């Protein structure tokens, strides 16, 4: 019995379903390991000892590479002093200062643990600051797993989601209609950095859409919340909408901010400072100093190594290489979203049979991909890693062609 099989059998006895949520590997593809032994740079090793080029990067948190030496050294220095104290360590202020310095839309910062903490805090602050209730949320956008925003409402009630109106991402008319429906009760609009909804092609926000969100919030005295939890620091070091020139009032961050250490953050403008100081939001571990030291080092390294430039260049190589191979194998592949956060779906593959067969074969050849979730590049990936991934995808394309012929 393999180590992974053994652990799964033990987990089934003591962990409901063997593993919760999207991390249950049965939801990915056949042959995917559930348990990992370690990670280093751009690679992960499963508990059976197999090494993969990692294109999931822990679903986003790894942006410099697994166990980045600079980040880990900073974390260890702080750990030697203390992590969970009676209150914050000085690094709390250092990190808030660094974010205010780096993020043009940030006049202040607060910290949490997860992305859901950060988005929930943003909504709470927006309502407190405006003294209104209604929040506009795009159909299909993921903002976390709390009852107010979970995409799987099992175990929640309608009463967990009052005072919300929906609009269609990138559709100005629908955003305006939702804002009209909210009337004088519009507290805020929460929008992901780009459209990365489950299982559909990704879409970058149009300039007109981002500007409309800003215009509506300005006209109505409402709060524009950018949910930068997934994309944050991968598209632009100062916030994903900086390229568009549209600045949010509040931003939610997590995932990549501390290169794998657990940290969420909310940054905001002065206009929200008072509301943010009055709401009661806290958590036992929200001051943990080690993750903050890791974040401080991560932010510095992101800038020093021009990570956005690096992962964008590698993402372009990956996209072009996949396109070329798809054409050569006669397979219709759709690639979408920012190249550093690639998603590929196969034309007509409604039940993901082709995607799963593709990823299972690529996994066997040494590349850890995902058949329907966007993937993530990191600073530790090299040209050679991308070449390995592209070689591995040839096994995937062959598997699909075999399935089509059969
Ligand atoms: C855009 C976005 N917001 C919020 C979240 C929730 O973050 P977490 O899983 O850390 O609670 C996620 C997680 O994938 C996300 O992608």
Image (tube, rainbow, N blue to C red):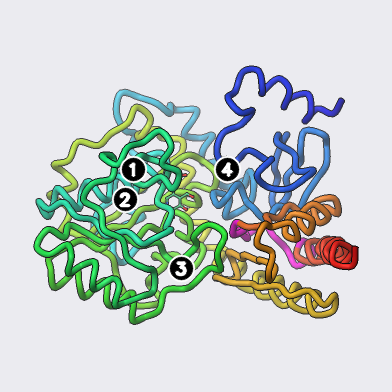
Q: Which residue is rendered at x = 31% and y = 33% of the image?
A: 88
Q: Which residue is mark 3?
A: 236
Residue 232 occupies quadrant: bottom left
Q: Which mark is residue 320?
A: none
Whichever of labels 1 and 3 marks the residue nearer the N terminus, that label is 1
- Mark 1 to mark 3 CA distance (whole Å): 20 Å
Are the residues tagged 1 and 3 within 8 Å (C-beta)?
Answer: no
The residue singled out by tag 1 in the image is 111
Which stretch appears magenta?
A: 373-385
Tell me the residue that label 2 is attached to: 266
Residue 183 sits above or below residue 273 on the image: below
Question: Where in the figure is residue 166, as x and y percent of width and height?
Answer: 31, 61
Decide if ligand 1 comes within 8 Å of the CB at mark 3: no
Sequence-first disc among 2 and 1 = 1
Residue at x 71% of width, y 72% of height: 333
Mark 3 Cα-neighbour bin, 10 Å: few <14, some 14–19, many ≥20:
some
- The quarter of the image holding the C terminus is bottom right
């Amino acid at each position: 019995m393999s180590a992974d099989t053994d652990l799964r059998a033990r987990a089934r006895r003591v962990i409901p379903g063997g593993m919760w949520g999207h991390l249950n590997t049965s939801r990915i593809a056949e042959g995917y390991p559930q348990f990992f032994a370690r990670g280093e740079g751009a690679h992960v090793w499963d508990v059976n000892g197999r090494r993969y080029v990692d294109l999931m990067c822990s679903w986003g948190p790894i942006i410099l590479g697994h166990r980045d030496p600079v980040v880990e050294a900073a974390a260890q220095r702080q750990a030697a002093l203390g992590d969970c104290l009676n209150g914050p360590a000085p690094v709390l202020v250092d990190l808030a200062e660094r974010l205010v310095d780096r993020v043009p839309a940030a006049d202040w910062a607060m910290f949490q643990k997860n992305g859901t903490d950060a988005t929930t805090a943003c909504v709470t602050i927006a309502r407190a600051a405006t003294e209104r209730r209604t929040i506009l949320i795009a159909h299909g956008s993921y903002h976390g797993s709390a009852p107010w925003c979970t995409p799987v409402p099992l175990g929640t009630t309608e009463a967990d989601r009052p005072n919300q109106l929906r609009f269609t991402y990138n559709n100005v008319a629908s955003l305006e209609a939702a804002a009209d429906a909210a009337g004088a009760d519009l507290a805020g609009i929460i929008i992901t950095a780009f459209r990365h909804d489950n299982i559909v092609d990704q879409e970058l926000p149009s300039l007109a859409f981002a500007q409309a969100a800003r215009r509506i919030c300005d006209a109505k005295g409402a709060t524009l919340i950018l949910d930068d939890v997934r994309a944050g620091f991968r598209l632009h070091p100062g916030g994903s909408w900086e390229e568009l020139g549209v600045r949010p009032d509040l931003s939610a961050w997590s995932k990549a901010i501390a290169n794998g250490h657990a940290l969420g953050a909310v940054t905001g403008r002065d206009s929200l400072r008072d509301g943010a100081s009055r709401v009661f939001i806290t958590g036992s571990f929200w001051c943990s100093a080690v993750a903050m030291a890791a974040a401080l080092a991560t932010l510095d390294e992101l800038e020093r190594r021009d990570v956005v430039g690096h992962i964008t260049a590698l993402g372009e190589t990956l996209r072009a290489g996949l396109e070329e191979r798809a054409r050569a194998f006669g397979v219709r592949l759709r690639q979408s979203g920012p190249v550093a956060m690639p998603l590929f779906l196969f034309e007509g593959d409604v039940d993901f049979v082709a995607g799963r067969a593709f990823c299972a074969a690529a996994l066997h050849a040494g590349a850890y991909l995902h058949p329907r979730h966007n993937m993530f590049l990191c600073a530790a990936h090299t040209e050679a890693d991308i070449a390995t991934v592209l070689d591995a995808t040839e096994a995937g394309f062959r598997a699909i062609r075999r399935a089509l012929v059969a």
